[in-house]
Image (cartoon, rainbow, N blue to C red):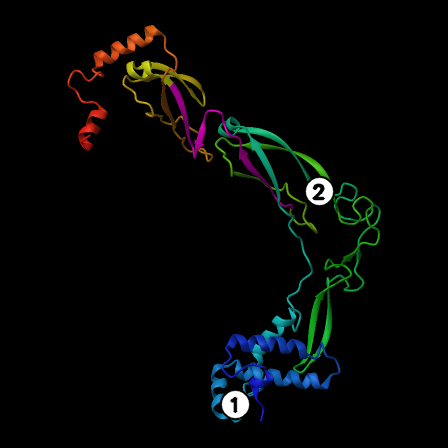
Amino acid sequence: MKDYYEILNVSKDASQDEIKSSFRRLAKKYHPDLNPNDKEAEQRFKEINEAYEVLSDPEKRRRYDTFGPEGVNGQAGYGQGFGGFGDIFEDIFDIFGDGFGQTTSKRRGPVRGADLRYNLDLEFKEAVFGTEKEIQIRKSEPCRTCDGSGVKPGSQKETCSKCNGSGEVRYAQQTPFGQFVRVATCDQCGGTGEFIKEKCNTCSGTGKEIRNKKIKIKVPAGVDTGSIISVRGEGEVGERGGLPGDLFIYINVKEHSIFKRKGNDIYFTIPITFTDAALGAEIEIPTLEGKESFTIPEGTQTGTKFRLKNRGVSNVKGVGKGDLYFKVEVKVPKKLTEKQKELLREFAKISGENHKDGKKGFFDKVKDAFGN
């Protein structure tokens, strides 16, 4: 009695994936195309397909497990015309690739060229306001000697003698299921259907040559590190008349000595004297467009942040602008003259910083809080 599990080298509790995996391995091992004139391999291949046709179907497998081969008698390998082998054919095609039966292989057509990448460094203001750059890239372009045909001037391409211009060749194969036709790309012309007998001396028949090319790039205002500019058609040349690829410019923006950018907003810190902070003052601040006056209110504390709306970076899409933020940092002089010290002591006295007026300072409050 045939044991389908034994034929497929799997256990009785094997999963469908395990059954399919074992079938694929054994079918490839014993396939008649790989074992020509081997009757034993052909018989083994038939048994493998018969076992898989039953065990790959949950209902047939249940009947087989319950009643043995009699439970599927008359169904393994036939019983529904030729449709019973549908899954088996699909698996065999997976194992050996396309090319059995009717083919969908076509003559090789145009192929688009590869894309190129270029890394472009920009100064901070170039990115903010936009600029125009000229870059140089090394790329393949149609051969100037043969205009990209690959053929020596004065000669021409010939129809491939092996495939008669179709770009593919057919091979008939005998299998246990009948004759199948395998279709493959012609190895003589590479699927083009044409053959170059006299190749161009410049490009050796490739139809393209490597050259340096200068390209002008318009950088829009508002780009930042990580922005990408695409230039259509400036990539590698295509194959067999295909379109060229594209060139992608990857932007890297250098840091600025004063400004820091976050999105479309600009940030910086500006130092002011404690006199200006206390009394208020009109100071000059830097902006993207240049210096301008700004009034600091009296009593400004160090770390205070100010905002100027719509004074940041333009949106790269051309809609709106960011803001400009700056923070003040009050600078305390490290060296004072005796006159300056005397005036500050007087200021402290007037301000009550000697605590003799009964007002409690910070450390008095700490002393009260901790009882020390």
248 inside magenta stretch = yes
Q: Which label sits on residue 141?
A: 2
Depth check, mark 1 against mark 2: the one in front is: 1
Instruction: Tell me which segment is drawn in magenta.
Output: 244-271
Q: CA distance from mark 1 to mark 2?
A: 65 Å
Using the image, determine if residue 212 lies above or below residue 303: below
* SS class, disc 2: strand
Q: Of 357 and 284, which appears nearest the observer?
A: 357
Badge 1: how crowded within 10 Å, few (<14), some, or many (20+)? some
Report the residue that reaches farthest toward the top. Answer: 339
Amino acid type of the residue that numbered disc 1 sits on in the rendered structure: Val
Q: Residue at x 29, y 8 (%)?
A: 343
**Between discs 1 and 2, the one toward the N terminus:** 1
Q: Percent x, y for residue 10?
A: 56, 81
Q: Percent x, y for residue 188?
A: 78, 61
Report the residue that reaches farthest toward the front. Answer: 372
Residue marked by disc 1: 72
Badge 2: how crowded within 10 Å, few (<14), some, or many (20+)? many
Q: Percent x, y for residue 44?
A: 66, 84
249 inside magenta stretch = yes
Amino acid type of the residue that numbered disc 2 sits on in the rendered structure: Glu
**Image side of residue 275 versus residue 108, left or right:** left
- Residue 314 in sight: no
